Image: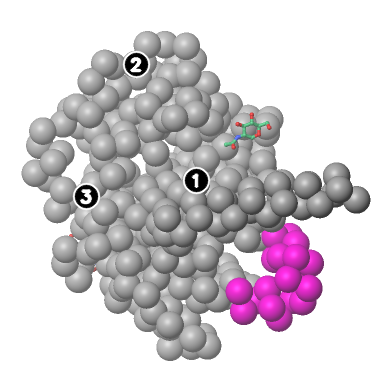
């Protein structure tokens, strides 16, 4: 008996110090944070899949505390930084790596190469499409129901979380503008394609809402024609890509307005990626925006084991597609605390967190 008493005392002391640590550090502004999207926010979901679009090797992660993790940048992704601004001490774990109760704080489902359409990026391998990410979220919902002993308790809990969705780039770069592998550009004009994408995206966001999500920030597709590898491949035609993708992005604020009207207690918000990037010109003027920090493979990802540039804070892009940590910080801050209504509408992420 004495042994168990001693154990109990040690355990409660341990739990108490743990509690103290948590209260000293402060609780995050919301209890949970879920991330959907593509390589801009993937934190390792592609690592064990059979595909080439992975970033779990050096020099990726050169400035990340854990080194290479599967993040497609030198340091943190936009999702990581928003998590820190929300007060989360630990990074939200990737779905591929889940263990136990940590799912109550949130999960990152994002997969590099994926898109709104199921076939997007599948030419690269078995990327996890947005529909499949939602399927994974449903699995997590069942696990949370088991932890909280009821599905309605789980849905109530999930209403308090922040959700971000960063998707759509690959529906252009790994679908519409790769006519050798995908039919969409022969089936649709850019205007029709934008409509088809928004229609499917709308269904997916309604599905997310049906799983309990209320506070959801969706990010527009930015000026993807200006990414270094796209400039190299498409030359002057890259402005065509920007024009097509902006047709899609311009439909997202109206989509958010419709969803907020139609769905119970919905608080969707639109983050205007293009606007945030164009108003970051003063920062970007100090950075190399044409080149990439790492040495590139022909597909625009870093060559494994290559030595990256020394001054990572002087480059806008780490590889041929993905911004460096310093750019992600500037971007995430504006999504979190908008400097103008055009950055985030109707709410920025800080306001979203505070809504009842
Ligand atoms: C995922 O799990 C593996 C094996 O346990 C571990 O080495 C890796 O660091 C984890 N990755 C992330 C991103 O947490
Ligand atoms: C640009 O588009 C035109 C017309 O579609 C095409 O003929 C040309 O090869 C393209 N140039 C590049 C660099 O892709
Ligand atoms: C997003 O930003 C772009 C670029 O500044 C602007 O043209 C567009 O009107 C903005 N869209 C919305 C819905 O505010």
The disc at residue 308 is 2
Residue 269 on image: x %, y %: 37, 71
Please state the extent of the stretch shown in magenta in the rendering: 138-157
The disc at residue 91 is 1
Where in the image, quadrant-wise, is ligand 3 located? bottom left
Q: Residue at x 27, y 50 (%)?
A: 331
Binning the other alpha carbons within 10 Å of mark 2 as few (below 14), some (14 to 19) or many (20 upward) gives many
Q: Residue at x 47, y 18 (%)?
A: 58
**With 246 as the anchor, is 75 left or right in this view?**
right
Q: Judging from the image, what secondary structure is the residue with disc 1 in?
A: loop
| Disc 3 + disc 1, Cβ < 8 Å | no
How far apart are the two marked residues, 2 and 3, measured between alpha carbons?
Answer: 24 Å
Quarter of the rendering containing residue 190:
bottom left
Disc with the residue nearer the chain's start (3 vs 1): 1
Extreme residue in the front direction: 2
Residue 354's place in the image compared with 224, above or below, is: below
**With 62 as the anchor, is 311 left or right in this view?**
left
How far apart are the two marked residues, 1 and 2, measured between alpha carbons?
Answer: 24 Å
Disc 1 residue lies near ligand 1 with CB under 8 A: yes
> Quadrant where the C terminus lies?
bottom left
The answer to which of 190 and 245 lies nearer the viewer is 245
Q: Judging from the image, what secondary structure is the residue with disc 2 in?
A: loop
Binning the other alpha carbons within 10 Å of mark 3 as few (below 14), some (14 to 19) or many (20 upward) gives some
| Disc 2 + disc 3, Cβ < 8 Å | no
**With 29 as the anchor, is 348 left or right in this view?**
left
Disc with the residue nearer the chain's start (2 vs 3): 3
The disc at residue 277 is 3
Q: Is residue 143 magenta?
A: yes
How far apart are the two marked residues, 3 and 1, measured between alpha carbons?
Answer: 25 Å
Residue 56 on image: x %, y %: 54, 26
């Amino acid at each position: 008996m004495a042994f168990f008493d001693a154990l109990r005392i040690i355990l409660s002391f341990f739990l108490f110090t743990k509690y103290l640590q948590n209260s000293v550090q402060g609780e995050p502004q919301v209890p949970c944070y879920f991330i959907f999207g593509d390589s801009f926010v993937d934190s390792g979901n592609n690592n064990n899949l059979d595909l080439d679009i992975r970033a779990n090797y050096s020099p990726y992660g050169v400035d990340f505390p854990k080194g290479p993790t599967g993040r497609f940048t030198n340091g943190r992704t936009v999702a990581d930084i928003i998590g820190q601004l929300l007060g989360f001490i630990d990074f939200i774990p990737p779905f591929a790596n889940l263990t136990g109760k940590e799912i109550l704080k949130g999960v990152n489902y994002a997969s590099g190469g994926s898109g709104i359409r199921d076939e997007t990026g599948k030419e690269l391998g078995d990327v996890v499409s947005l529909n499949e990410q939602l399927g994974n979220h449903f699995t997590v919902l069942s696990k949370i129901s088991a932890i909280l002993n009821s599905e309605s308790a789980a849905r109530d809990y999930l209403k308090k979380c922040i959700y971000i969705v960063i998707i759509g780039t690959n529906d252009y770069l790994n679908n519409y503008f790769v006519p050798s592998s995908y039919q969409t550009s022969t089936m649709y004009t850019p205007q029709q394609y934008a409509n088809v994408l928004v229609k499917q995206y709308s269904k997916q966001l309604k599905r997310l809402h049906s799983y309990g999500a209320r506070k959801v920030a969706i990010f527009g597709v930015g000026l993807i024609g200006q990414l270094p590898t796209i400039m190299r491949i498409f030359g002057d035609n890259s402005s065509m890509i920007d024009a097509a993708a902006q047709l899609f992005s311009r439909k997202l604020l109206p989509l958010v307005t419709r969803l907020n009207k139609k769905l119970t207690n919905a608080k969707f918000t639109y983050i205007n990626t293009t606007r945030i990037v164009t108003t970051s010109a003063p920062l970007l003027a100090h950075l190399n925006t044409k080149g990439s920090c790492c040495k590139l493979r022909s597909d625009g990802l870093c060559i494994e084991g290559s030595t990256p540039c020394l001054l990572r804070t002087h480059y806008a892009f780490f590889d041929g597609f993905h911004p460096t940590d310093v750019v992600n910080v500037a971007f995430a801050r504006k999504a979190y605390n908008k400097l103008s209504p055009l950055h985030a509408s109707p709410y920025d992420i800080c306001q979203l967190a505070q809504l009842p």
